[in-house]
Image (spheres, coloured by chain):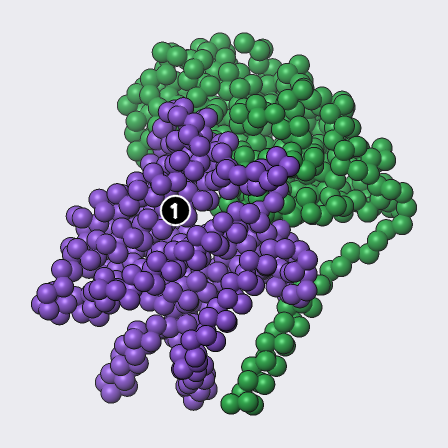
Amino acid sequence: MSGATERIRNDWRSVGARWRRAPRWMRWVVLAAVIVFFYALPNKEFYQYLGPIPTTESNFGQVLFTVSIYVLLAVGLNIVVGFAGLLDLGYFGFFAVGAYTVAVLTSPSSDLKTLWPWLAVVPLAVALTMISGVSLGTPTLRLRGDYLAIVTLGFAEMIRIAATSSTFLKGQRGFNQIPHPPGEYADGKPVFGVLDARPYYWLVLSVIILVVFGVRNLTRSRVGRAWVSIREDEDAAQLMGVPTFKFKLWAFAAGAAIGGLAGALYAGKQNFVNSQNFELLNSIIILAAVILGGSGNIVGAIVGGGLVAYLIERFRGIELFGVELYEYRFLFFGVILVVMMIFRPEGLIPNRRRAAEFKDRRKEVTVGG
Amino acid sequence: MRQRIARTIGGVALVALVASAAACGGGGEETAGGEACGSKIAFFGALTGSSAALGINENNGVKLAVDKYNKANPDCKVEQVELDSQGSPDQAPQLAQRAIDDEKILGIVGPAYSGESEAANPLFSEAGLVHITASATNPTLAQQKWPTFFRAVGNDLSQGPAAGTYIKNVLKAEKVYVIDDQSAYGAGLSDEVKKLLGATVVGTDKVQGEGKQTDFSASVTKVKSSGATVVFYGGYYQEAGLIRKQLTGAGVTATLVAGDGVNDPAYISSAGQTAAEGTILTCPCQPATRAKGTFAADYQALNGVAPGTYSDTAFDAANILLAGIKDGKSTREGLLEFVKGYSGEGVSATYKFTETGELDPAQVKVWAYKIQGGKVVPDQEIPKA
């Protein structure tokens, strides 16, 4: 058994090594092909040839939108958990702040009656989420590990309970008629309509590409190196002159901003936001997605977030031995997580440095055992 | 290396084959017959997850209607599609669009909750797919000019004031305590009750629904110290049963009044028969129709459980759609027109819809029911305030 897992591990590693050895132009070509593939994916003319990939029991375009939102969230959480090593169990709270900011300022059912257009509110939503990230982080980032996890959990629960109970945030009745993003086709039809989910998906996909580009640059800069040093050993980093608190706050703010942006995009598509959207389970699913995909690796986070959101929908309508798989979706999810954590704790597509850390730990264990 | 790649590709192909075989399983065979034969109607609501109880009740009601229809018309069957939304607005659009994509689906029973209705109804109205909800009672749904929206029950505005009127005129309560579960339904009802009762409401409290809370001692203490003689609960039967039990356990003898969301056999079993005794339940349904035909027995026979909250309304809603299909309406436009002009008797009410898709106000009769000897018995019709 261990021999087999070791071999799979080596296979993976050789694939990774070959990828890194490949000439630059080849990498760009592959990347461009992948991007084109995902832009083409929601078109029926294209996906009908993909065999079992499209979802059968729910509309594929709509599902892809959900998947893209999850991917964006995973990329954002990956900054906090993967790069800076801060265990955040309440990430969905930021998503809620973004979505609610848009709802309160644009919806006719809100008490403010400002009725702003969607586009004007988006920067505000991102800014407000960032502020909420900083104001949550300032008093709590002196904590570490489990303690920080509990504080972030509390934050998400506070948001959820406020959304449920406060009359200003309308609880389960929610805000309806939130406007769509702007834009019209030549024939006067809105680009972002009701029935066609593809434009929304393309919008989020473009946002993801921009965000990934930004995050990648951040991680390869001084900031990113500081994050990695904090993740590996905070005390050592502090001793070497890295202002750890400042950089942890940075990570929190950056992650929060991306979460808020996802929330704003979601509200513009759904044009309805209520307290049922924000369950604690969502925070946990996003965290699990990041860890499953490979914490600390952007591609890993994208794969994890996408897989989790997609597979849940893919289970619809598949019956095995007379049991609807969809009803047991979280059982599968749990089993996969357990198996992954035993055989591949670094995730599907690991960050090389983190994989090395895990390997060291494994060695230590075998020495001790 | 080459061998390894070949093996990987082989593995992927195998997985793909298995998945596609699974995906292609259960292809339906075409039925011969008229235009409308082989049509489908769908139920849209929560069948799994924390708020699935009502969805399952409704789905079983639809199942019974389709089953009866297929037995009566064996050469022209109608199929039922189940769309499990988990009651969450996130899932609603992709399922709504899935229903729209399937051209055989001519009508929908649902969405079951107000939240998912807000998310799904814009898509239905864009596509002209008629949907009759059996339980989404938020009044704002009818005010959004969705041409395809129909509601087979009275909304919160009809039932809430009636419950308030009953508390005021029949129970003649001086002190009323109002509790709700913060759901769209529960909060909507209790807001209406509070509006009508005004100063006689001595206190209000909020609890958590969907099985998230089982200990209501804080609310019970507040009720006890307020000296209220009537407690109104806006919410569903799971919590109502526990609240009634804990009130009785604390020696509070105040009468519990609640809406149709509590009108479920499970309420009596979770509160215990002695504690449940004397509970008043309002419902926009008439007792004469309660016993109509053999609905309860048939439902029990098909689903193995007794009908619960909204089972009958969903059964009626499905029957309205099926009557249209029986009438030879084989297109969505046709069925939509049919439902617009429909008037007829169901097991739970007489149906006729207004311009906005609401049940005709003249048909909304709110009755008060009393729990006596472990059974729900009709008490009186509540006059419109």
Position of residue A259 in the picture relative to residue B29 (left or right)? left
- Of the pair A162 and B247, the residue shown nearer to us: A162
Residue at (42% x, 75% y) in the render: A24
Position of residue B24 in the picture relative to residue B144 (left or right)? right
What is the x, y in percent for residue A129?
Answer: 31, 43
Residue at (63% x, 45% y) in the render: B97
Question: What is the three-letter code of the residue carrying label 1?
Answer: Leu
Secondary structure beneath label 1: helix
Quadrant showing the N terminus of chain A: bottom left
What is the x, y in percent for residue B236?
Answer: 49, 34
What is the x, y in percent for residue B174?
Answer: 38, 11
- The residue pinned by badge 1 equals A261
User: Could you tell me if residue A328 is visible in this image?
Assistant: no
Chain A palette colour: purple
Residue at (23% x, 47% y) in the render: A134
The chain displayed green equals B
- Of the pair B342 and B199, the residue shown nearer to us: B342
Q: Quadrant of residue B34?
A: top right
What is the x, y in percent for residue A62?
Answer: 57, 49
User: Could you tell me if residue A153 is visible in this image?
Assistant: yes
In which chain is the residue bearing label 1?
Answer: A
Q: Quadrant of residue B27?
A: bottom right
Residue B248 to residue A329: above or below? above
Residue A249 to residue A295: above or below? above
Residue at (34% x, 60% y) in the render: A215
Quadrant showing the C terminus of chain A: bottom left
Number of residue marks: 1
Residue B232 to residue A320: above or below? above
- Of the pair B321 and B285, the residue shown nearer to us: B321
